[in-house]
Amino acid sequence: MICRLKSVVVGVACAMGFLLLAAGVASAQDIKTNYMPGTDFSKYHTYKWVSINNTEQADPIVAQQIKDAIDTQLASKGMTKTDGDTADMYVGIQTSIQQQQQWNAYGMGGGWRFGGGMASATSSTLQIGTLGVDFYDPATKQLVWRGEATKTLNPSKNAQTNLNRINQAVAKLLKNFPPKS
């Protein structure tokens, strides 16, 4: 009996550890970037914020938090924000919140072999938030760099957690910006 109890406890501990590991992996942000080949990024020193029409946008508070995070990262790379029309580069953001259905199921007891048990399944909706950052060359009116961070705008009840997630995603997203020629 004690051996069975130990194996059940070990099995439950292993299952919980696996679930925690899976939850950590599932919540990691995915970063993708791409840029126009042959672009001379060394000529970009100033930037201006622009709106991207016909796209889903975050609420004004989140949008400002995103812009502040990007401003911080670009300033650390020696770029200067301007409101003038003579900016070397235009920057725009896009956001998207998609919903994904998730089923959570668990069971207790020994099943048919050990005389029954009980099980439960619940459904929840996950918000998978994506942040897109675009850099345009105003002279050519062409997109020169695009970055995307998924699982970034997943709303939480804690405002500080949301802000930390945005700052972390933007830092990862712009880590290798500008690209090396």
Image: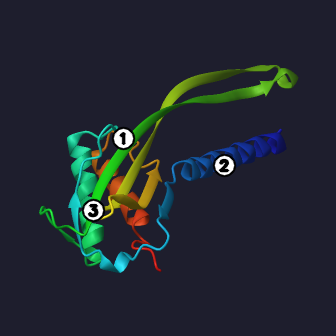
**Sequence-first disc among 3 and 2:** 2
Which residue does the image show at 76% across and 41% down from the upper left?
8
**Sequence-first disc among 3 and 1:** 3
Disc 3/disc 1 C-alpha distance (Å) = 37 Å
Q: Describe residue 13's horizontal placement relative to residue 181 as left or right.
A: right
**Sequence-first disc among 2 and 1:** 2
In which quadrant of the rendered image does the N terminus lie? top right
Label count reads 3
Q: Secondary structure at mark 3?
A: loop
Q: Secondary structure at mark 1?
A: loop
Q: Tell me which amino acid carries mark 3.
A: Pro
Q: Describe residue 70's horizontal placement relative to residue 10 as left or right.
A: left
Q: Which residue is mark 1?
A: 156
- Answer few, some or many: residues within 10 Å of disc 2's Cα (few below 14, many 20 plus, some between 14 and 19): few
**Residue 74 placement: quadrant:** bottom left
Q: Tell me which amino acid carries mark 2.
A: Phe
Which coloring applies here?
rainbow
Q: Looking at the image, is 137 positioned above or below residue 64?
A: below
- Answer few, some or many: residues within 10 Å of disc 3's Cα (few below 14, many 20 plus, some between 14 and 19): some
Tell which of 103 and 98 is nearer to you: 98
Q: Tell me which amino acid carries mark 1.
A: Ser
In the orientation shown, which residue stands out farthest toward the right?
113
Q: Which residue is mark 2?
A: 18
Residue 16 locus on image (x, y percent): 64, 45
Question: Which label sits in the foreground, 3 or 2?
Answer: 3
Which residue does the image show at 39% across and 67% down from the upper left?
174
Q: Looking at the image, is 136 positioned above or below residue 177?
A: above
Q: Secondary structure at mark 2?
A: helix
Q: Which residue is mark 3?
A: 138
Question: Which label sits in the foreground, 2 or 1?
Answer: 1
Disc 2/disc 1 C-alpha distance (Å) = 23 Å
Residue 6 locus on image (x, y percent): 77, 46
